[in-house]
Image (cartoon, rainbow, N blue to C red):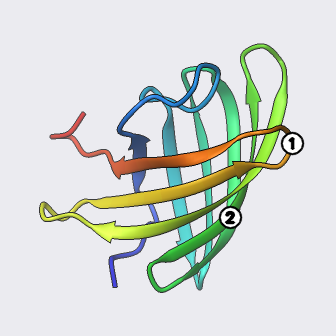
């Protein structure tokens, strides 16, 4: 099983649609006893939070965020935790908004000193 997400910082590898999470967004993850949560911000996101559970290499969480334009949005995401060859962690995500139309997939990877 890939290692704990606790204390890791992850960032998207590609920009999503305008006004959403993008490569400037940083997610600070926490994990304890099967619970996961994170704070995130950057780009168009002023403040975001996610909370959910982890079973093995599967995360299941909901997220809420406040954007620069003052609007809020929320959704649901299921992610696969993947260990990269260089020891970093990748999350392969499948998400869907619950507060508005739209769904998709994204990839976030652990940010280290060497990787920016």
Horizontally, is 103 left or right of 26 in the view?
right
Residue at the disc numbered 1: 99
> Mark 2 near mark 1, Cβ–Cβ under 8 Å?
no
Residue 66 vs 60, above or below: the answer is above
User: How many C-alpha atoms fall within 10 Å of the one at disc 2: few (<14), some, or many (≥20)?
Assistant: some
To which quarter of the image does residue 76 belong?
Answer: bottom right
Which structural element holds mark 2? strand
| Front label number (2 vs 1) | 1
To which quarter of the image does residue 102 belong?
Answer: top right
User: How many C-alpha atoms fall within 10 Å of the one at disc 1: few (<14), some, or many (≥20)?
Assistant: few
Q: Total of numbered circles in the picture?
A: 2
Position of residue 51 measured from the top left corner of the image (x, y, whole percent) = 70, 62
To which quarter of the image does residue 17 belong?
Answer: top right
Find residue 61 and name its label: 2
Horizontally, is 12 left or right of 19 in the view?
left
Position of residue 12 measured from the top left corner of the image (x, y, whole percent) = 42, 40
Q: Earlier along the polypeptide chain: callout 2 or callout 1?
A: 2
Position of residue 53 measured from the top left corner of the image (x, y, whole percent) = 65, 76
Which structural element holds mark 1? loop
**The N terminus lies in quadrant:** bottom left
Residue at 80% in and 39% down: 101
Q: Residue furthest top?
A: 69
User: Disc 2 and disc 1: Cα gap in Å?
Assistant: 15 Å
Residue at 21% in and 63% down: 84
């Amino acid at each position: 099983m890939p290692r704990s997400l606790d204390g890791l910082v992850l960032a998207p590898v590609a920009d999503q649609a305008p006004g959403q999470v993008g490569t400037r967004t940083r997610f600070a993850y926490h994990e304890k006893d099967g619970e996961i949560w994170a704070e995130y911000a950057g780009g168009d996101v002023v403040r975001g939070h996610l909370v959910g559970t982890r079973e093995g290499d599967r995360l299941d969480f909901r997220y809420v965020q406040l954007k620069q334009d003052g609007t809020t949005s929320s959704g649901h995401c299921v992610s696969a935790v993947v260990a990269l060859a260089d020891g970093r962690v990748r999350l392969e995500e499948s998400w869907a908004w619950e507060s508005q139309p739209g769904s998709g997939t994204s990839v976030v990877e652990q940010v280290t000193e060497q990787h920016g």
